Amino acid sequence: MNRTARALVVAGPVLGIGALSVYHGRFVADERYDFFSSFRFPWAVGFVAALVVCAYALGIPGQRPSRGGAWVGALGAVAAGAVFLSICQLVVGSPLLPRLVILGASAVLVPWFVLCCRLADDVSRREREQTRVIVVGDLADVSPLWIDLETSPERPATVVGMMTPDEARLGPTVRPLIDAVVATGANLVVLDRFALAEATVVRQAARLHERGVRVRSLSEFSAQWMGKLPASELERASLMFDIAEVHGGRYAPVKRVIDVACGLACLVLAVAVAPLVALANVVGDSGPLLYRQPRVGKGGAVFMIVKFRTMRVNGAPTTWTTQDDPRITRVGRLLRRAHLDELPQGWNILRGELSIVGPRPEQPEYVAELSQKLPFYGMRHLVRPGLTGWAQVKYGYAGDNADALEKLQYEFHYLERQSLSFDLRIMARTARSVFGGAGAGR
């Protein structure tokens, strides 16, 4: 999602609600009032915040929806914001904002949000067309770039060519990399570790850089355009960065305060929905309300994770839990779709076993297996595991060892860039996944 479209999503409600509120106070109200010094001002700020949050959760403007989808998302965001304000008015027992402001803002913001979606879509399409990439490296390592850039890139780009280091090597009368860039109109060259070790390839890249062509290592390109570290670079890259939770002084205590607040909120919601879940289980699939399972946490310590049960009590074992696991009950499927099964983990958060954001904890037997197969897998246990995480919003479930390796690339990216702002970004994308079904969107 481009920054201009994101700024406009915020500016629209601010200007629309602000202008209508000022107009009502000066020209419409029976008793004139100054909006900015009235009790209505903080409620208008809350209405703006609700609209912006609802818009983001429903995929505005970053999901590039169809024309009908953009209108549905815009209508849903405005309706959800209006419902939020209506509930607040019922609780307080008095009208907080005039109907002119609520209805007028709703009428203006629906087409405004659609316009933001169109702008984001146009900018993204132009950036994809303008960022033309040639990759030099081992084809087995760089070929997945095609898929990554088509599925959920952080920044759009088009791969217009791939070469091995041998094919790109400079000769007495040939300069293959330079010629390929000229022929394809590429403006970004990506070099993997083998290409970077080839002096004649680096020499050509330097000449291209002098002409204004951008040059990136495969690690830098993957981090900036896909939000992960490539599998071929995990061992090398894992040695070259600090982890904020381990090496930073301020990050860990502030994050813990946020964890405690969010953990309490999760427990309150869990208690509120527990009677409904229990009743649904009686009707759908009788058994225990809660499910406990050992998981590996920080420092390799094993703890018991707590969730609402979503599987049959005597379900046949499988190697991995999948998105459409046959053991999931009908009630459990609904709980998972709404992510309500995760709420009891607020208890694990308060106990310090989980964080809100971090690598998702795995079962001990899988950890033992993956530690033998994946390079530096144990580094993910230097931090608290999370209720949600970068790998979850970018990739989802791991169904086998290949998926686990894919998720590890995203987890290393998170460890390298761990910060409060990144955590908030992941939490926002998780909310978008829950409410809009679009976790991987920008």
Image (cartoon, rainbow, N blue to C red):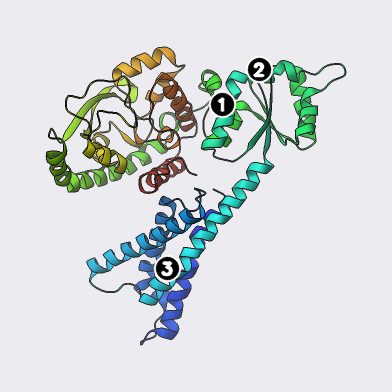
Question: Which amino acid lies under the numbered mark 2 shown in the image of this protein?
Answer: Phe
Location of mark 1 (residue): 144
Q: Residue 252 appears at what percent x and percent y? A: 38, 36
Q: Nearest the camera: 338 or 250?
A: 338
Q: Position of residue 166 (x, y in %)?
A: 72, 15
Task: Left or right? Give the position of 314 relative to 39.
Answer: left
Q: How far separated are the C-alphas under marks 2 and 1?
A: 17 Å
Q: Could you tell which of marks 3 and 2 lies nearer the N-terminus?
A: 3
Report the mark closest to the observer, 2 or 1: 1
Q: SS class of the residue under badge 3?
A: helix
Q: Residue under circle 3? A: 106
> Dot 2, how many residues are within 10 Å of its Cα: few (below 14), some (14-19), or many (20+)?
some
Figure check: 196 above or below 357: above
* Mark before the other along the chain sequence, 1 or 3: 3
Give the crowd class for mark 3: few <14, some 14-19, many >=20 residues within 10 Å. Answer: many
In this orientation, does residue 198 appear? no
Q: Quadrant of residue 355?
A: top left
Q: Secondary structure at mark 2?
A: helix
* Distance Cα–Cα, label 3 vs label 2: 56 Å
Task: Say if mark 3 contacts mark 2, CB within 8 Å.
Answer: no
Is residue 237 left or right of 376 when viewed as pictured?
A: right
- Give the spatial CA distance, label 1 vs label 3: 44 Å
Q: Residue furthest bottom?
A: 30
Q: At x 27% / y 69%, what residue is drawn?
A: 89
The three-letter amino acid code for the residue at tag 3 is Ser
Residue 356 lies, in percent from the top left, at 34, 38
On the image, numbered disc 2 is attached to which residue? 194
Classify mark 1: residues with Cα within 10 Å, few (<14), some (14-19) or many (20+). Answer: few
In the rendered image, which quarter is residue 437 located in? top left
Looking at the picture, which amino acid does disc 1 mark?
Pro
Camera-nearest residue between 271 and 254: 271
